[in-house]
Image: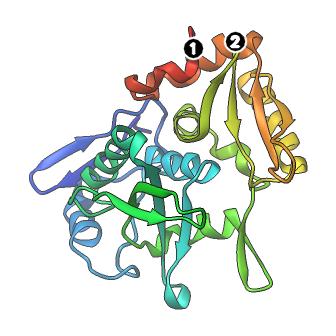
Amino acid sequence: MIECLKWFYFNTYFINDCNISSILLISSNRLNYFYRSFFTCKTSVERIGPHNIDIISIYIGSLLGDGHLEKRKQGLGTRIKFEQSSKNVEYLMWFHSYLSQRGYCNTNKPKLKTIIRKNGVIYYHYTINSFTFSSLNWIHDMFYKEIEGKYIKIIPLNIEQFLSPMTLALWFMDDGSKLGKGAKIATNCFTKTELEKLCKILKNKFNITVTVHSGGINKGYTLYIPSSSMSTFSKIIKPYMLPSLYYKLGNY
């Protein structure tokens, strides 16, 4: 096993800065093939990977947050759509840089867009669309179920095996915030049953105590991390966080 997969990009090896062992091995004599199939192909069927564990962690963490996957026409591939308001532009640009350097999205920087909502409020935001990969359809199948012709995002039953420190960091940077001496994660789109199972997983795998709280009338549920677990939680995710977002962890 190698700790991180070496990405072949033009004449440069990009070595991912992950601390988790890679689930993939690639021999040196296949690097030229990898370059051709991953970076120069134009269709999702040809664009097959391989995908390093840090990329999978980013996808999973984003999906637990505000990110969502879109299965393209005829089901030939899946892409991730990631959106942030103008207030979180530094985080979004970091996300874009991370993906674009590894060949997962266009290198052009996202542009500011505006939306006029029903109440007349103007919303400024940035959006990133990754390239489409046929080899990422399995993540869409894992995170979505089809109900009356619409895809509904769920927490997968096998989510435990995909939770890593980087996954938790992306999730918290996306939807986390300081709350008193603890922290909150907005999880309003998931059911109470799903979140209760997730709390047990976080306790068993990372020794983090997390409880489910009401998000308000018709606003679903949120997760709360009490002060007793903040030190443990911070030690796990802080090495993977953008420094400008450390404030979400309070004094931990």
Q: By what rule are the colours in the image chosen?
A: rainbow
Residue name at image x 68 percent, y 35 percent: 185
Residue 1 vs residue 217, the one in the foreground = 217
- Residue 47 sits in quarter: bottom left
In the displayed structure, 17 sits above or below 106; it is above
Question: Neighbour class for label 2 at 10 Å: few (<14), some, many (≥20)?
Answer: some
Foreground residue, 230 or 167? 230
Q: Tell me where residue 230 appears, x and y as whole percent.
A: 67, 15
Q: Which residue has dot 2 on it? A: 181
Vertical relation: 130 (above or below) 192: below
Height in image: 210 above or below 175? above
Q: Which residue is mark 1?
A: 250
Task: Provide residue 238's location: percent of width, then percent of height.
Answer: 50, 21
Which mark sits nearer the N-terminus, 1 or 2?
2
With 179 as the anchor, is 136 left or right in this view? Answer: left
The residue that appears at 57% across and 62% down in the rendered structure is 68
* Residue type, label 2: Lys
Q: Are marks 1 and 2 in contact (CB under 8 Å)?
A: yes
